[in-house]
Image: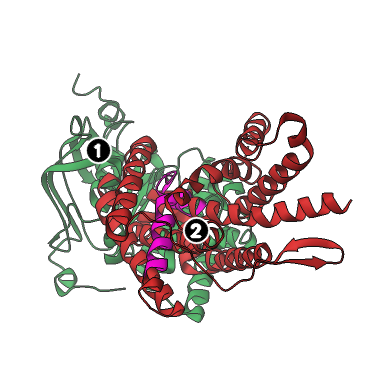
Amino acid sequence: MNLFLETLIGGLLAGTMYSLVAIGFVLIYKASGVFNFAQGSILLFAALTFVTLLEKGLPFVAALAVTIAILILGAIVIERTVLRPLANRSPMTLFMATLGLSYVVEGAAQGIMGAQVHALDLGIEDVPIFLGDVLISQFDLVAATTAVALALILALLFNNTRIGISLRAVADDTRAALSVGINLNRIWQIVWAVAGIVGLVAGMLWGARQGIQFSLSLVVLKALPVLIIGGFTSIGGAIAGGLIVGAAENLAETYVGPYIGGGITPWFPYFLAIAFLYIRPAGLFGERALERV
Amino acid sequence: MVSESPSRNTPSVPLIEVEGIEVVYDGAILALADVSLTIGRGEIVALLGANGAGKSTTLKAISGLVVADRALITRGTVRFGGEEIGGIAPNLLAQRGIVHVLEGRHVFGHLTVEENLRTGTFLRRPGRAETERDLEEIYGWFPRLKTKRRTPAGLTSGGEQQMLAIGRALLTRPELVLLDEPSMGLAPIIVDEIFEIVAALNRQKGTTFLVAEQNIAVSLRHAHRGYVLDGGKVVLAATAAELRQREDLHEIYLGLASA
C-alpha cells in the first residue's frame, strides 16, 4: 500500500509541473486560438536568461525582475511582428508561424547565451521526507506548491478582472470583442507575457531538477497529452490533465513497467491521450460551443 | 458623450458621410461597388436590401470591422463628424463613438449576461459605482436581462441575446449604433419590442441608429429615412414615409426592377 501511495503522490506532484507547462499553452490558445509550438522555446529562453543573469552575479530577485521585463518586451515584439500581421489567417498559418518562432527563439537563446548546460540551484534541498510513513520528495512538494499557487493567481486574474473578462470575451468571439472596443493586440501582448512568465516558473523548476539545457524546450511534447486530456481551453483542465498524466505514468512505470521491460514514461501519456480522444475529444474540461437548442 | 470633437458638434456636418465606397474581400470579391449615404445626428436610418446586397459590408465599412474579415475599402471615403475614418481599427472607432451590433448577435456565449454587459464598459474604464449605475440603466431599458444576469449568455433566448448585444453596445456610450438584422430569427412580437426600444432610445437619448434590415415593414415604421441596396449599389434613397408609399419597393428589393 505504501508503495502505491508513494507512486501515486510522487506522480501527482510531478504532474503539477506538467500542468504548469500546459497552462502556458492554454492561455495562448484561449486568446488567439493557436497552439503555440514556441511555448517550449520560450520556456527555455526564459530559464536560460534567468540562470545567465544569476551567473553574471545578479541577486535572485533582480535576475527574476529583469527576466520578466525581457519576457514582457518579447511578448510585445512577437505580437507586433508575428501575430498582428497574421491576424485573421487560418489557424494552420498561425501554427506554422509559431513553429518558425520556436526555432528563432531557440536560435537566439543559443546565439546569445551559449549552448552549455547550466546548473540552477534554487536553494531547495532535494531530500525525501516522511509524511506519515510515505516517503515524498521535498523538491516535488515545493514545486507542486508553486504550481498550485501560480494557478490560483491566474484563476483570480482571469476570472473577474477587466483583463480576465476581456480575455474570455476574445476567446468566445473576437469580432464582437473588437466591436465593443476591446483592444485585441493588447490582450495578445498580455497573454503572451503571462504565458512567458508561467514558462519562466516552469523552466526554473524543471531546470533546477535536470539542469537548464536545450532539451528543456522538449517539454512541449510532455504538455501535448496533458492538453488533449484536460482540454485546450481550460486552466482547470490543464491542472487536472497534468495530475492525471503524472499519476498515470508513474503508476504505469511501477506496476506495468516490470512486465514489459520498463521505459513506459515517455509514451504512456500519449497512449492515454489517444484513449481520451476516442472517448472525449474536447478533453475533460474543454469548452464546447454553448448553445441553446 | 465621450470625446466629442468640435467639428462633430457643428450641426451642418452630418454624423456619417459615406462617399462612393468600393469594398473588396480577399483582394478579389467585390462586395460593394458604389455606396454613398449620409446619416444625420439623431436619425434612425434604415438600410434595406436582399441577402448579399451589401448591407452588412456597408456597416462593417463604417465600423472598421471590414479589416477583421480581410476586406478593404478600395475606393471612396467614410467620414465621421467630418473626419476621415476609413481603415481605422474597430476598437478605436468604438472608442470614438461608433459601435457595431453584429448580425447574428454575437454575444459572448460562455460569459454571463452581466459579464457581457460589463465588456461594453471597458473602453471607458469606469469605477465600480459608475459601472453599477450604467448596468442599472441598461437593465431599465431591457428588464428581461436583469432576471438573467447570472445566466451564461449562450443559454438565453434569441430575443434576449439581441437585447444583450444592443445593451452591451450602448454601454460603450456610442453616438452611432450600427444594427445588423436585429429581427433575424426572432418572433414578430419580440422584433416589435426591440424596435420600440430602439425608437425610445433614439427619442430620449438622441442616439443615432443605422439599421440594416430585410424586414421592410418594421424598420420603415421606426426609421426616419431609408436607403435600398442592390448588387452593392444604392438604388434608392428616400424618407421612410416615401418608401412606405412605394409599391415597387419589393421589386427593387428583390432585384427585379433592373431585370
Question: Which region is colored magenta?
Answer: A26-52
Give the x, y percent position of residue B171.
Answer: 42, 66
Q: Residue furthest top?
A: B259
Instruction: Give me the C-alpha separation between circle 2 and circle 1.
Output: 69 Å
Residue in view at x 69 percent, y 36 percent: A262
- Residue A47 lies in the magenta-colored region: yes
Chosen colour scheme: by chain
Label 2 marks a residue whose chain is A
Give the x, y percent position of residue A251.
Answer: 75, 44
- The amino acid pointed to by label 2 is Gly
Q: Can residue A143 be seen here?
A: yes
* Mark 2 nearby-residue class (10 Å; few <14, some 14–19, many ≥20): some
Residue in view at x 74 percent, y 39 percent: A252
Chain shown red: that is A
Q: Nearer the viewer, mark 2 or mark 1?
A: 2
Residue B228 shows which numbered tag? 1
> Is residue A119 shown above or below B24?
below
- Tell me the quadrant of the picture where the C terminus of chain A can be found: top right
Q: Which residue is mark 2?
A: A211
Residue A70 lies left or right of residue A278; in this view the side is left
Residue B188 lies left or right of residue B64; in this view the side is right
Residue in view at x 55 percent, y 44 percent: A222
